[in-house]
Amino acid sequence: MNKLSKVGIFSLMLTASLTIMVGSATTPALLKISQHYGVEDMATWLTTLPALGVVIFAPLAGRLIDRIGSYTSLCIGLVLYGALGVSAIWLTETIPLFADRILLGGATAIVMASSTGLLAEFFVGEERLKMIALQGMSIEAGGIIFLSIGGLLGGLGWQWPFMIYFIAWIALMFIMVFVPFRKGNHSEEGQESSKEDNWKTIFPVLLSALLAMTMFFIAFITLPFYLADSFQLGSTTTGYFLAMISLIAVISASVMPKMVKKFSDYQTLITGFSLFTLGFILLMLGQSFFIVAIIAGIVIGFGFGFTIPLANHMVVEKSNVSNRGKNLAYFSSFTFLGQFLSSLVEGISTNLVIIYAIAISIGILIILCYSIWLKRNNNRQMVQTH
């Protein structure tokens, strides 16, 4: 197996960070951008439509990757990502603009799935887990960096934040120069080639990704209102608070491989959902104590690091060479669908206590289901060994 240099690893991590940038790049200047296009009433669509595009086009992205390979698919995805991201500057009508944002989500689906697929071709086993954990860290770090850059560029004018999408073409040059071309990897560990394309095996992992992202985004989209109502915090302080959660997510993703090694993948997932649930309980109970809100944010950040990057790795491990692209595309679709579900949950009530109670119920339900499933699976393995 060809080794990947440190610059090659950086290239793939830079590429991975683009997936969170798809919406966050323009968010700081969303008011100016929506005013320019005359869509103030639909401003949030400019950031959420790419997620819809990921959900719609993920199956097609998976087929493309399985057919032509991760490397070629990634290059195509990066070309489209940069072109579609920047082209919004020259669009004047609402429908073409929204269509462009949806197609940008399709390019994101290709980039997200193929970058992980390519990473999986260079690493196996424990090293692969570490690399995918590093990828999760890069995605969260990218969110912090690109939000900051988007805010600075937004101060120059409504169109400047769109220039951030040109980073995709810089990433493309890095990939072509520092990452060896691979048509596909058919020489991985022997046990991987014997894995079955079993939806029952992959679905629990995809479900965990969907629900983890739903819980994380419920916190992210409600915390600005929670902090303003409970502690009268302004947008600047709230931004620092959300950045703290992202930073904690980066740290927890680095700890996650050690958790898996000491316990197991599903036990670590259960721990992540337990942390999410605890975080929402603290938010419900600590509306008069800011220190409790800080602890809740830290706990929720750790919950993210113990779930999403791990679920990504589990999808890779439960796939084989022929279906990895399709399964990783499903992972992309499920995670972005989780973002949409968080908006639906948030719209149920204006009372945050009710919203957090729903999130707690989701957490408890999945903890119970996965605990029962894990116990039954362990009992079955014990019977088979005896």
Image (cartoon, grey):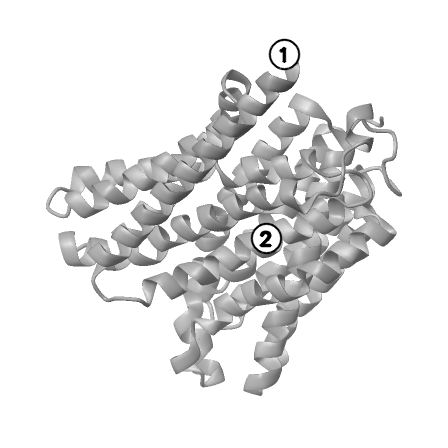
Q: Which residue is mark 1?
A: 386
- Seen in the picture, residue 176 relative to 98 is either above or below; the reply is above
| Nearer-the-camera pick, 355 or 99 | 355
Say which quadrant the N terminus sits in: top right
Can residue 223 be seen at all in this image of the molecule? no
Q: Which residue is mark 2?
A: 19
Quarter of the image where one finds residue 355:
bottom left
| Nearer-the-camera pick, 202 or 48 | 202
**Residue 90 at what x, y percent from top left?**
63, 80
Q: Give the mark nearest the N terminus, 1 or 2.
A: 2
Q: Amino acid at mark 1?
A: His
- Seen in the picture, residue 126 relative to 288 is either above or below; the reply is above
User: Residue 189 shows which numbered tag?
Assistant: none
> Measuring 43% from the left and 37% from the top, which residue is drawn there?
249
Other residues around mark 2 within 10 Å, as few (<14) / some (14–19) / many (≥20): many
282 relative to 126 in the view: left or right: left
**Residue 201 at what x, y percent from top left?**
64, 40
**Residue 323 at what x, y percent from top left?**
77, 46
Quarter of the image where one finds residue 310:
top right
Q: Amino acid at mark 2?
A: Thr
Q: How many marks?
A: 2
